[in-house]
Image (cartoon, grey):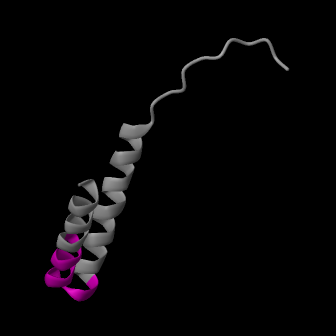
Amino acid sequence: MSDRPVKRVEDYTRPFLVTGFFALFTLLFLIWAAWGYHRALALGAALWLVLRLRAR
């Protein structure tokens, strides 16, 4: 066992959310490029609804 004092863990929530945003943006952009704007818009709307319903 080590005798080092226990410290607070750094909060990585914001970097995780920023990385997730860029990954989602890239995914929607690739869908838009491959299959068109309407499918990317529909997927974005569906994800928004799922997140909105789970937040309740």
Residue pictured at 32% horizontal, 63% vertical = 24
Q: Position of residue 9 (x, y in %)?
A: 54, 26
How many callouts does the rendering have? 0
Give the side of residue 18 with respect to residue 35, left or right. right
Q: Position of residue 23 (x, y in %)?
A: 36, 60
Q: Is residue 28 above or below residue 36?
A: above
Q: Quadrant of residue 5?
A: top right
Q: Nearer the viewer, residue 25 or 1?
A: 1
Give the side of residue 38 with respect to residue 13, left or right. left
From this viewpoint, which residue is outermost toward the front? 56
The residue stretch that appears in magenta = 34-44
From this viewpoint, which residue is outermost toward the bottom? 35
The quadrant of the image that shows the C terminus is bottom left
Q: Is residue 23 above or below residue 42?
A: above
**4 is within the stretch colored magenta:** no
The quadrant of the image that shows the N terminus is top right
Q: Nearer the viewer, residue 50 or 41?
A: 50
Q: Nearer the viewer, residue 6 or 25?
A: 6
Give the side of residue 25 with respect to residue 42, left or right. right
**40 is within the stretch colored magenta:** yes
Q: Position of residue 3 (x, y in %)?
A: 79, 11
Q: Nearer the viewer, residue 50 or 21?
A: 50
Q: Quadrant of residue 54?
A: bottom left
Q: Position of residue 55 (x, y in %)?
A: 26, 54
Q: Is residue 40 above or below residue 18?
A: below
Residue pictured at 32% horizontal, 65% vertical = 26
From this viewpoint, which residue is outermost toward the right? 1
Instruction: From the image, give the main secondary structure of the stretch colored magenta.
Output: helix
